[in-house]
Image (cartoon, rainbow, N blue to C red):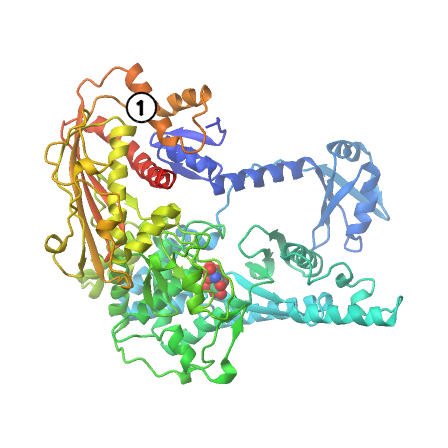
Amino acid sequence: MEADGDVKTTATGFHCTLCNVNIPNMSSLEQHIQGRKHKTLSTVRATRKSQEEHSVFVAGIKPHISQTDIAEYFEQFGPVTEVIMDKENGVFAIVHFTGTESIQEALSCVEHRLRDLKLRVKPREKKGFKLIPKKKNDPQNLQQFLDRFKPQLCQLMSVDAQMQYIVERCQLGENEKKARELLVQLLQEVFVEFFPDSQILPFGSSVNTFGIQSCDLDLFLDLDNTKKFQAHAKSTTEQAGQGTSDDSHSEDSILSDIDLSAASPADVLELVATILRRCVPSVHNVQVVSSARLPVAKFHYRKLNLQGDITINNRLAVRNTRFLQLCSGLDDRLRPLVYTIRYWAKQKQLAGNSSGAGPLLNNYALTLLIIFFLQNCDPPVLPTVDQLKDMACEEEECVIEGWDCTFPSQPIAVPPSKNKQGLCTLLASFFSFYAVFDFAGSVISVREGRALPVTDFLGHGDGDAEDAMEEQQPAKTHHKGPKLGPLNLLDPFELTHNVAGNLNERSGRSFQRECQEAEKYCRSMQYQRKSTKGKSWGLVRLFTPDGDASHAKPEQLAISVPFKLASLPRALRDQLQAAGDAFRPLWFQKVCAASLAVFQDVLGCHLVACTDAVFGEEPAGGDADTSAASLNTSASENGDGLQNDSGEAVVGTKRSLSSGSDASSSPQGKRPRLAKKSRADLPTWSFVQRHAVWAGRRKVRRELVKDSDLRQEGSCTELEAQVTARIAEKEAELKEPLEFQVHGQMLGGTETTRAVLRFEEASDKKGVFQDFFHFLEVFLPRMVETLLQKQEATA
Ligand code: UTP
């Protein structure tokens, strides 16, 4: 890693001053520096610096002076690229030049006179670039809210009342709603001037009944009618011959500059941004983000202090907002649940990506998780989307971009739920539902109201899920499958979109862990009963970050290897798909073999003993040991067999771990069931390590890479093995060798599919072992993943 001026060493690791985050160790630091957030901020900082160096500040302007006047005046000092006006009062501007020499020219001019005005020209202030987190997502603010309302919450008589109180306190007030409507109206009036027949439609939290005060204003600019208008105007002009003037070709019509049906979304949004900048008072910080999944023009509306986003290809979002409104109308319990769970998720830093992008859940995804849970209550609180479709009448049929978005327009069309559970119970059930959910092994379908096995989404196309999709969407001809990840949650309408596809392993794991913690807390009296001694209870304790609610911390010496279907090679994915029901044990075996290879071949650990391994699937609630399907392949038949350094089968090895699929494949045509519980015990391995192979690896790796071509693809594990060998060769042995045991356990079915390796230190070298363990926490899952990927090359 190159030296980075933003990184400071601290007592507990590192601190990145640019991103304002603490980083525990060197390998995380490397990842951080290569990560999107750090790179984006570095680029933004560089752009700002360059802008500062290429511009001057001009004061003394009066409102009658236009941008063009200023640009023309300053052209005498060199080419001007942009003039940014102070729209509010029109008294200052920032003038950008192409070259820095123009700045010197402008600054050295003794007097600047523009018409009757004397302008003051100054160099730009050099402001240090600092990341300012968005206020509304700042946990600090939530904490302030909680501190303020804690006494009131604690005085209420029930959790149900507390949840209702949260809604009342957080929801958008009538005045704010009205002010937003007026802004939408203003934008509509402005846009229709430039884009005839266009329509601006709000969606998201402003209108979906789950909005909080000062939430974003999401807008969809519908240009379909404008496109028709433009096409019609064009053909009329062509028919009438040259020289005919109409609206679309008049001098000041923006439509004469762009062909809407051919232009890219980014180009159209640039026009939208220009209109916002020039024509809408109180609009600031306009920016087009074209790299987003859906390009967007962002702006800040100062009068209401709110952030607005305009998209032009997001018709589905307007429809799914209608769906959320309908769900809200179907059952009164949904809103208090959504507000409470959103609040909890923000407090626990599980949701609310500060810059719009990031690895946390977005609010839409979180709301869908709640809806899915309510569909799965017994009896269900909400119907599935497929059921809603059947309740719609002909006029309500709706297909957008090929996706069936039909549902009734009014709640009256849907029979009320038979479920009569209170909010307190439902909230606790939400946590227990997701505390044991197999996120990695399933795909959540709000459309069908059930979890589908993730292997259903392995098509034979380009790593996508075409087959599964075509079955559900005959109207669609070709769609790529959803991006699979640690949490797979299908959009109810756009069935190829995983709305939680942005989550990473860590954020996915955190969500489940926090659900487990919350579930435990909800079983306690402090959750259910008001404290008679005036202590915190109910939601107040639930919301406390890392407070009383989190009793047990996850086990100290355990490393999880997540099931990441999407990153597995084609050959292995095919094997897993063919294994049907038994896909977990098969994957477990592969992980087991790969882990052993990392310990022995990559890290040079000596295997001194090994006990038996048992793999299997059992029906939920069954007994793992009796139903486990043991493997019969002998060590000698298996390349991955457990052998000691001299090639002999190691002590205690009764069966080895097969890497083939036959032992675990299920009868053809049998549909995988998610209710099965996968349990498998890996062998317990006893290892000895004589060298500090974790210390100074980076340096050794750099040296090795410098004088070899080992960096080439596929050589990562070989390189790491060489690093180990070099350390063993050059560095003295540890005074006392490390002896440790690794016990593997495979989980899945009723909790998220993963392999867990538990470590036990046998040689009483606590400090040294901790170092080794911390290194393994990052190194082992990464190497296992690499080895699993390499299987394809060797298959
Ligand atoms: P958000 O996740 O921002 O939800 O998505 P929100 O309720 O508006 O919350 P905040 O207050 O802005 O954070 C906004 C809308 O974008 C659409 C949905 O219509 C959602 O209501 N959306 C979002 C999608 O259609 N797909 C997605 O994957 C995400």
Going by the numbered disc 1, the residue's amino acid type is Thr
Badge 1 marks a residue whose secondary structure is helix
**Is 56 situated left or right of 688 in this image?**
right
- Which quadrant is home to the N terminus? top left
Front-lying residue, 680 or 115:
680
Q: Would you say the beta carbon of the disc 1 residue lies within 8 angstroms of ligand 1? A: no
The quadrant the C terminus occupies is: top left
State which quadrant residue 337 falls in: bottom left
Total labels: the figure holds 1
Q: Quadrant of residue 682?
A: top left
Rendering coords of residue 30 (x, y %): 42, 33
Left or right of 254, for residue 716: left
State the residue at coordinates (22%, 60%). 676
Between 657 and 694, the residue placed more toward the observer is 657
Instruction: Tell me what residue is drawn at x 60 percent, y 37 percent.
Output: 46
In the shown orientation, is residue 42 left or right of residue 195?
left
Residue at 33% across, 19% down: 726
Residue drawn at (74%, 59%) of the image: 258
Q: Position of residue 595 (x, y in %)?
A: 26, 37
On the question of residue 559 being in view, the answer is no
Q: Is residue 486 left or right of residue 642?
A: right
Image quadrant where residue 272 sits: bottom right
Q: Residues within 10 Å of mark 1 (few under 14, many from 20)?
A: many
Is 66 or 209 nearer to us in this picture?
A: 209
Q: Is residue 624 above or below residue 162?
A: above
Seen in the picture, residue 310 relative to 645 is either above or below; the reply is below
Q: Residue 707 location in percent, x, y?
A: 45, 19
Q: Which residue is mark 1?
A: 724
Residue 644: tell me if it is visible.
yes
Closest to the observer, 224 or 544: 224
